Image: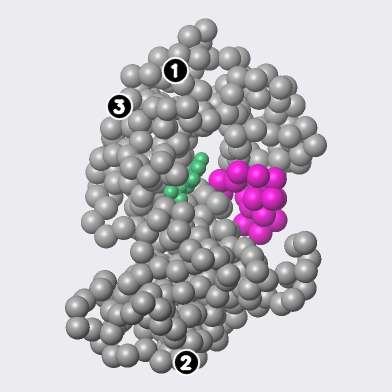
Amino acid sequence: MINFKTIPSPSYVIDESLLRNNLQLIKQVKEAAGVDILVSFKAFSNWGVFPIFKEYGFGASASSLNEARLAFEELGVKAHTYSPAYEEKTIKDILKYSSHISFNSINQLRKYSKIAGQQGVSIGLRVNPEISNSSHDIYNSCQPGSRFGITADHLSDGLPQGVEGLHFHTLFEADSFALEKVLTAFIKKFGKFLPKLKWVNMGGGHLITRKGYDTDHLVKLLIDFKKKYHVDIILEPGSAFTFQTGYLVSTILDIVENNGIKTAILDVSFTCHMPDCLEMPYKPVILGATDERKGKPTYRMGGISCLAGDYMGNWSFDKKLEPGDKIIFDDMIHYTTVKTTMFNGVNHPSIGIWSGKSGFKLIKEFKYQDYKNRL
Ligand SMILES: Cc1ncc(COP(=O)(O)O)c(C=O)c1O
C-alpha cells in the first residue's frame, strides 16, 4: 500500500505493482490468442516507465509523428500509425518510424501509398463498421457523420491496390461481447476483402484489465477469427494498460462556502489535470470518500484554475475536511498526463512511481520554464 504521506503534492503516482499486474494479464492474452497487442500512446506515453513496458515486449500504436518517434526512440519499436490525415511535411518521418500505416480515406491512400510502399511500410485502410458500444458521443467514432474510417458503401469498387490490412476502432471501455458484435458487423460489411489481407487491426477500447472481463472469451474469439480468415490480428488498447494503476495526489488549500455548499479548493484542477471528468463527464473516485450521504460532511472539490466550471461534486467524508488534508483521486494514470494543460499557468503535478521496495521515485517535475516554453 502506498504511503501517501511521503508523496509530494500535487503528484500523479503510478503504482508499479498494479501496472505490472495489468502488463502481465495483457501479455497472457497476447500469447494465448497468438495476436499482437500494442500500447496505444494516446492513453499513456510516459516514457520514464517504458523500461518496465519493455520487459513485457509490447509494440506501440501512434497517431502522430511525435508518438511514432517516441515509440522508436524510447520503446525501441516501429509504430503502427493511424491519423485522420497526414501532412506532406511530416509523412516521410512518420514512415521512417512506422512498420504499418493506416489511411483514413481513399484520397489519403492515393496520395501517400507510393511513398509508404517505397519505404517498406505495410499499408492499411481504416474502415467504419458503423457500430459502437459507446453511449457517449465524444467517444463514439461510429456516430452518423463520423470522420473516422471508410464506410462499406465507399468501397463498392473493391479494395485499392497495395492495401494489406484493415483497421477499425469502434469500442470504448468495452468487454469482449461488444467486440463480438462489432466483428459480426465488420465481417458482414468487409468480410469479402479478408482473403486479400495480411492483417486486421481491431483498434482499442478493449478494457481487458477491468475486473470481470472475460479474457477466455476474448482469446476464443480471436483464435476463431484467425483460423477462419488467416490474417494476423492486432489490438491496440490504451486504457487497459494503465487502468486503475495509480492516483492523483492533491492537497486542500482552503474551504469556502456559498449558499450552504462547501467547496474544498485543491492544488489541482479538473480542467487541467483530470480533463476527462469534465469532457465525458464522469465523477472520479476519491479514496476514503463516498457519493453524497445525508448527515455526513459533504463537499464539492474545486480546481485551482479560474474556470467557473472547474469543480465537481459532491463527496461525503467520515470527518470534516481541513486545509492541509490530502485528497487522492483514484485511477488517474490513463488519459491524464497525455492531456494535461498549463491553463492559467497552474502548476503541473509532478509524475512519479511507487514501488513496494524503494518507495516513491520522482520521474518528472514541472517548472516555470515548462510553462514558458510552450508559449
Ligand atoms: C484509433 C484508436 N486506437 C486505439 C485507441 C485506444 O482506445 P482505448 O484507450 O479506449 O483502449 C483509440 C482511442 O481513442 C483510438 O482512437
Mark 1, ligand 1, within 8 Å: the answer is no
The local secondary structure at tag 3 comes to: helix
At 65% from the left and 20% from the top, the residue drawn is 107
**Percent from the top left, x then y, of residue 81?**
60, 40
Quadrant hosting residue 242: bottom left
Q: Which residue is mark 2?
A: 324
| Residue 255 forms part of the magenta stretch | no
Image quarter where the C terminus lies is bottom right
Camera-side residue: 137 or 154?
137
- Which residue is located at x 55 percent, y 75 percent? 304
Toward the top, the furthest residue is 157
* Cα–Cα gap, marks 3 and 2: 54 Å
Placement of the N terminus among the 4 image quadrants: bottom left
Residue 22: image location, x then y, percent: 39, 62
- Classify mark 1: helix, strand or loop: helix
Specify the quadrant of the image occupied by residue 171.
top left
**Measuring 40% from the left and 61% from the top, which residue is drawn there?**
243
Q: Is residue 13 left or right of residue 88?
A: left
What amino acid type is highlighted by mark number 2? Gly
Q: Which residues are magenta?
A: 59-77
Marks 1 and 2, how far apart in space? Answer: 57 Å
192 versus 260 height, above or below: above
Q: Circles 3 and 1: CB distance less than 8 Å?
A: no
Report whether residue 231 is seen. Answer: no
Would you name the residue on which mark 3 appears?
184
Instruction: Report how far apart the C-alphas of labels 3 and 1 lie in the structure.
Output: 14 Å
User: Amino acid type of disc 1?
Assistant: Ala
Specify few, some or many for label 2: CA neighbours under 10 Å numbering under 14, 14-19, or 20 or more.
Answer: few
* Number of the label disc, if any, that sits on residue 152: 1
Looking at the rendered image, the disc whose residue lies closer to the viewer, 1 or 2, is 2
